[in-house]
Amino acid sequence: MTPTNGGWRDNKRQSQRQGDLRLVCRDIACEEYLVANENSQFDVLVIGAGPGGYVAAIRAAQLGARVGIVEKQYIGGTCLNVGCIPSKALLHIAQTYAELRELDKIGIKLNAEPTLDMSVAVAFKDKVVKQLTGGVAQLLKANKVAIFEGTAETLSPNRVRVTLKDGTTQELETGKLILANGSVPIAPPFPGLDGRNVIFSDDAMNMPKVPESLVCIGGGVIAVELACMFNALGSKVTIVEMLPAIIANEDEEVSQALTRSLSKRGVEIAVGAKVESIADADGKKRVTATTSDGQQKTFDGEYVLVAVGRKANPAGLDGLIRAGLAMDRGRVVADDHLQTNLPGVYAIGDLVGKTWLAHVAMMEGELAAEHALGHDAVMDYTIVPRPIFTFPEIASVGLTEKQARERGGAVRAEKFPWVANGKALATGETEGFTKVILGDYGEILGAAIFGPDATNLITEFSLAMRAELTADEVIATIHPHPTYSEALREATLAAEGRAVHIFQRSAAAAARR
Ligand code: FAD
Ligand code: NAD
């Protein structure tokens, strides 16, 4: 099949586009907006320096625009300071700690039981965060982006007042405004939330010690990642989720496999249980939930983690809201060019809340900057990889099997287990599977991986979907041996009914006919 989307044949067109972009900026947008006072007047002003905002600022600067960015708390936003990065540093420590305790299974004896110094673990995490956020600040400066450390308040689509950290205020003017204010955790409206030992994900990044026991309210992405982390560090963890399954948006088989995996490692999981209060009882925290059959159930722990979702943070946008900025359930509405309904005003990332993922915020940031500077950049939300950093990892892209079947048409979905992959056997990573979902013509509708390095491996399917490859082309691609990547090809073969490294009755039956 000829790639029709981003294939080599489109390369010429792509480089033409890059050239056009530079021209647009040099010739029209920048000159139009360039003005005398370089500290208060910009072509593009960005509010919020999270992954959406800082990427937008750098991209706009690359295109030659005069750019300013306002950040009230920390460069790097949620993701770099209290989200993606610190959680992955701590998950790495937890996984290493757990693996050390299993080493005797492969013949390695430690002279003593490993122990954990939580203060050193947190210091390691802090060092990672500092290095990354410092690097981003340097990049912004190197790209000549003016950084304002303060809180932005929008006065109009072209005017923003900043209250700087020293309490003084400054008014900034801009041609285009990119809103990247991000999100904050949802505080559910039940009693006991402000009590001692009730934590949110931000607090989980700075624990003074490993909790003896922890009740997680919510069984979404944050809860399952942190449940894995604290379980590996030695906590007794309970997850209480109101829906019938944890990570309910994912493929059912993945959710079930994670449930089994966590249960095997001693994590208690209660689903169909809506938490209604937190209280102190018997020296612990007591979480009370109502189950789907109307019963009251309680769960006790030393700590309670509240992880019931995040909400957009439109703080500082009152001026635009008064000017008619379109909002939907607290989120700013943006189209696929990232434009809001107000001319020249863009919105990206968690503030728009289409996916709540850092890599989506970054892509939206790049495209918003390009569109703001005159190019018709369009965001495509159909192929978004969804990584979950559990043990083992989960990653999916495209449709789940259920979504594909609900859509109608012929669907072929099959799994290839890690236990049949040589590299997985050699590294003892045999839990889970890779699942591929194919449509009528062998097009890849979706894929889900539960297993080693899933969050890196999923990119093969994302790229294949982006390039509109069919199963045949994945199968015709030689994958190196022995690697985890072979499982992706085998799962694709399995969906076609002809996997080699597992027995498939369908293939044998076809051969006999
Ligand atoms: P944010 O990162 O929230 O940044 C917004 C910034 O705007 C903040 O720095 C804020 O201080 C600033 N701001 C807000 N209002 C103003 C104002 N008025 N003036 C000035 N500044 C302002 N996503 C992934 O893809 N992978 C992961 O592994 C992952 N792990 C996560 C783990 C945790 C525990 C959490 C909580 C989230 C995780 N996420 C992950 C989600 C990810 O962090 C967000 O999707 C991402 O940070 C959104 O980027 P953003 O730029 O839209 O907003
Ligand atoms: P979430 O929406 O994924 O999960 C929240 C869960 O809490 C839901 O399953 C919901 O049913 C449940 N819940 C709500 N109220 C409840 C109640 N009263 N009792 C019991 N359960 C209740 O939200 P999150 O886990 O807080 O994560 C927020 C966002 O951050 C996610 O949407 C995700 O995109 C992003 N994130 C991504 C990653 C990653 O990419 N690896 C990691 C962490 C966070």
Image: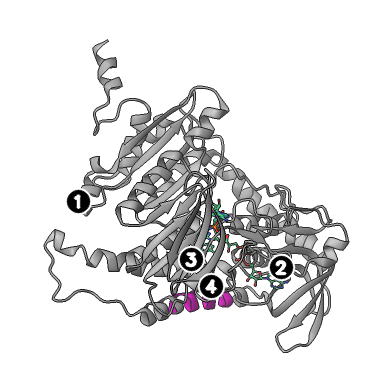
Question: Helix or strand or loop: what does disc 4 sit on?
Answer: helix
Q: CA distance from mark 1 to mark 4?
A: 36 Å
- Foreground label between 3 and 4: 3
In front of the other: 345 or 372: 345
Q: Which residues are magenta?
A: 127-138
Where is mark 1, residue-wise?
Answer: 426
Q: Is mark 4 within 8 Å of ligand 1?
A: yes
Looking at marks 3 and 4 on the same chain, the residue that comes earlier in the sequence is marked by 4
Could you say which disc has been placed on residue 196 in the image? none
Q: Disc 2 beta carbon < 8 A from ligand 1?
A: no
Question: Could you tell whether 351 is left or right of 219 in the image?
Answer: right
Q: Residues within 10 Å of mark 2 (few under 14, many from 20)?
A: many
Name above or below for residue 506 compared with residue 354: above
Q: How is the image coloured?
A: one colour
User: What residue sits 72% from the left and 89% below the top?
Assistant: 166
Q: Which mark is residue 46?
A: 2
Q: CA distance from mark 3 to mark 2?
A: 43 Å
Pointer 1 or 4: first along the chain: 4
SS under mark 1? helix
Query: Which residue is rendered at x = 58% and y = 41% of the image?
Result: 382
Measured as percent of width and height from the top left, residue 472 is found at 40, 29
Q: Is residue 476 visible?
A: no
- The numbered mark at residue 286 is 3
Please name the residue shown 27% across and 26% down the image. Answer: 504
